[in-house]
Image (tube, helix red, strand yellow):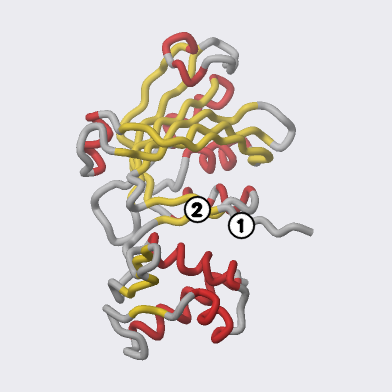
Amino acid sequence: MSTLYAQVCEEILQKIQTGVLKVGDRLPPESDYAAELGISRSTLRLAFSELEASGVLRRKKRAGTEIISDTPKKRFNMATGGISDLLSLGRDTKFAIHGTRTVRTEDVALLKGHVSETGHWLEVTGTRTLPQEALPFSVNRVYVPARFAAIEPLLKPGRPSVYRIIEEAFAVEVGRISQLVRAIPCDAEDAAVMGLAAGAPALQIEAQLFLSDGPLMEVSVATFDPNRFQVRTDVEIE
């Protein structure tokens, strides 16, 4: 079931696309509009934020909320309510593998503090694209410890993610994910792949995936075009 703010987003967007509301119109003040819709002001703010991020609305202090488009920009939204949500990137986007190689722990700063049985890792580089698009919105580097490096021959086109190949090949399952999200200036090589200018703002996610019984499955770093990717946290307090 979708969240209430997501339902409000759909309702507002439907009104725009059916002509009830028009591009150029200004919406009522938040308190008035929330009362009209029968929702809380905080729920309306979440809906407005989502529609603003997708390029449908523009909000300005003292100027109100203006409709600027009837078509949301394509963007991958990764919710963070649980493991299934965090792994949605692998389910809902296309992953293209561009190369593999063997690296040593000491050669990759990201691997500092992690252990591979032989001191070597399988590095898998690739990109992700949104459905119906050709230009990648992320550049990915995945590091697999020696215990799972035998998956290399299984890295075929069309596979959704490295972790899924490990799960299938070794009959294991992801049990825990630890990740760090930060803003960075995009380096020239990754920027060129995603159609960005060198040094442009980008989002980077460093992640560690662990098996349900504890051992490390993979370490990864992914750089994203922030105009086509966002992370949303939606946590209910019980």
Residue beneath label 1, please? 234
Q: Residue placed at 50% from the left, 69% from the top?
A: 47
- Above or below, 110 relative to 234: above
Seen from the viewer's position, the closer of residues 142 and 151 is 142
Residue 78 disc label: 2
Instruction: Decide if residue 188 is on the left or right side of residue 155.
Output: left
Residue placed furthest toward the right: 238
In percent of width and height, residue 193 lies at 23, 39
In percent of width and height, residue 154 lies at 44, 36
Instruction: Decide if residue 170 is on the left or right side of residue 212.
Output: left
Q: Residue placed at 36% from the left, 47% from the top?
A: 226
In percent of width and height, residue 23 lies at 28, 79
Quarter assignment of residue 212: top right
Say which of marks 1 and 2 sits in front: 1
Instruction: Decide if residue 159 is on the left or right side of residue 127.
Output: right
Q: Residue placed at 41% from the left, 83% from the top?
A: 14
In 3D space, how far apart are the residues under numbered discs 1 and 2 (Cα atoms)? Answer: 10 Å
